[in-house]
Image (spheres, rainbow, N blue to C red):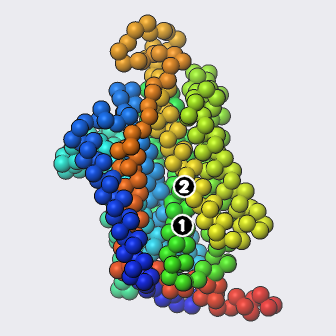
Amino acid sequence: MKKIHFREWTVPSPRYWGVFAVLAAIVGVGLISALYMEHEGHWVTGMNNQIVWGMPHVFAVFLIVAASGALNVATIGTVFGKKPYKPLGRLSGLLAIALLAGGLMVLVLDLGRADRLMVAMTTYNFKSIFAWNIILYNGFFVIVAAYLYTMMEPKAKKYYFSVGVLGGIWRLILTTGTGSIFGFLVARMAYDTAILAPLFIVMSFAFGLAIFLLFLFFAFDQDGREIGGKLLFRLKNTLGVFVAGVALLLLIYHLTKLYGTKYHGVEAFILRDGGVYTVLFWVGQVVVGLLLPIAIIIHPTLSRSKGWIAGASAMVVLGGLAAMYVIIIGGQAYPIEMFPGKTVIASGFFDGVHGQPNYYAPSLPEILLGIGGFALAILATTIGVRMLKFLPADLSDEALDPHAGLKTGN
């Protein structure tokens, strides 16, 4: 491999500022929406005392999970020694930090009383999985920043591998903690299973790589930089493996639930009788998020097109949002059974009500806040690549493998 040179994103200024203005406006609308909900109270949202995690949590958890997966590109190059991935490490680390920042912005603003964030960061209840995650999120920022420093500062190169290994391990722990938030909630029948942790890990691989590819393709196309066919082949195959892994673990998750009699009710709700949740599961999560991307990736012709690979990546992102909606909101929509096998005649909290799912419809401010967090992540990445040398100047086959032509000729 030739020495890869890095340079800033040199797209013409009018185009850059146009992208900047659009993303900044979306972030601004998201912040205004958060301020509106904070001022008026959560009665202006679709949330209630049965469904307390709404649409902002869907975006927040998706972005946090994707942040871990975005760093996977750098980990493949560092820990597993895959040289074609090493030039992508800088962008991988930057995007990981930006996605986590966007997700945490949505999370903090949705929970309310953002001014008391320092209390949550300095006072811990170690019996709470949320307290663990505060430590994991802060640690992720510090470790990835150090990881980027070892990539960009020649004097720190000797720590590159060690910090890369630490980052790879830390992100796995972080995603395990995020999945365990739901897996530890035994009161919710849709949660209450340890397999959610590995499912979230594999989903992070797929979501993070999909967002990484979309940003990489956009940045290179706008700047006129080349991505070689061999690297494209590796990236799309890696995405295919991750998406197939999600499909496998999702199948195991539902087969495990179906095996236990006490979960038959919630499985029927998600898979057959859940209305919008059933539609989002089969159409959004399974067809759009899993089957269609796999079909494109394994297709002998479509898989050679960067446009189709970008389309498959976009489908993975949309399917991921649908998956989070089904997991987070669908899991709350199924009523809590306070007294299994018994019928509660009357309750102001709707616990034990069989066959009557909890109602939730996301409000516009909730949706705008979630989209604002997504825009913040892309905006931060855009500013980063514009100001510092995060992008490789050339990812062509000749740059990554100067002997490619000779090998082909032989």
Residue drawn 47% across and 15% down? 353
The residue pinned by badge 1 equals: 214
Above or below residue 392? Residue 337 is above
Three-letter residue code for mark 2: Val
- Quadrant of the image containing the C terminus: bottom right
Between the C-alphas of marks 2 and 1, the distance is 10 Å
The image position of residue 63, as x and y in percent, is 43, 54
Question: Residue, x 55% and y 72% (percent of image)?
Answer: 217
Left or right placement of residue 239 versus residue 383 in this view: right
Furthest-right residue in this view: 410
Label 2: few (<14), some or many (≥20) within 10 Å? Answer: many
**Which quadrant would the N terminus be assigned to in this image?**
bottom right
Q: Is residue 408 above or below residue 334?
A: below
User: Looking at the image, which is closer to me, 274 or 157?
Assistant: 274
Provide residue 102's location: percent of width, then percent of height: 36, 57
Q: Position of residue 87 (x, y in %)?
A: 51, 79
Q: Are marks 2 and 1 in contact (CB under 8 Å)?
A: yes
The amino acid type of the residue labelled 1 equals Leu
Which residue in the protein does label 2 denote? 317
